[in-house]
Image: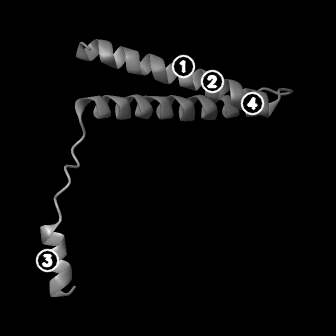
Amino acid sequence: MGKRAKKEIEAAPQQNDEMTPEDKRFAGTLNYLARGIILGGSLAVIAGWLIPGVDMGRMLGLGLLVGCLAGVTMKNINDRKQGR
């Protein structure tokens, strides 16, 4: 890296990459939703393998939907524990 590039990096204003509390809460909500969707979908596919004569696509779709609802429920339970 040359002298000019170093000067430009030093002169550039530093960005504040810290997340606000609202951003952290939103990221937590997305985390719980992702966990619920993954767990719901995987459990539905496993149930589809074990139960003979069911449509695997329908099982996956219902599992993803139920997982989304479970993720919202997990987020609500966590919020109640933390007093929000």
Measured in 3D between alpha carbons, the distance from the residue under mark 3 to the one under mark 2, in whole angstroms, is 53 Å
Asked whether the beta carbons under mark 2 and mark 1 sit within 8 Å of each other, the answer is yes
Residue 56 is situated, as x and y percent measured from the top left of the image, at 78, 33
Query: Mark 4 or mark 1, which has the lower sequence index?
Result: 4
- Image quarter of residue 81: top left
Residue 66 is situated, as x and y percent measured from the top left of the image, at 60, 21
Q: Secondary structure at mark 1?
A: helix
Kind of residue at disc 4: Gly
Kind of residue at disc 3: Lys
Q: Residue 13, relative to residue 57: is it above or below? A: below
Q: Nearer the viewer, residue 69 or 10?
A: 10
- Which one is closest to the eye, mark 3 or mark 2? 3
Q: Residue 72, relative to residue 6: is it above or below? A: above
Question: Which residue is tagged 3?
Answer: 7
Kind of residue at disc 1: Leu
Residue 16 is situated, as x and y percent measured from the top left of the image, at 19, 49
Res 35 seen here: yes
Asked whether the beta carbons under mark 2 and mark 4 sit within 8 Å of each other, the answer is no
Residue 69: image tag: 1
Give the residue at x 16% y 78%. 6
Measured in 3D between alpha carbons, the distance from the residue under mark 2 to the one under mark 1, in whole angstroms, is 7 Å
Question: Which residue is tagged 2?
Answer: 65
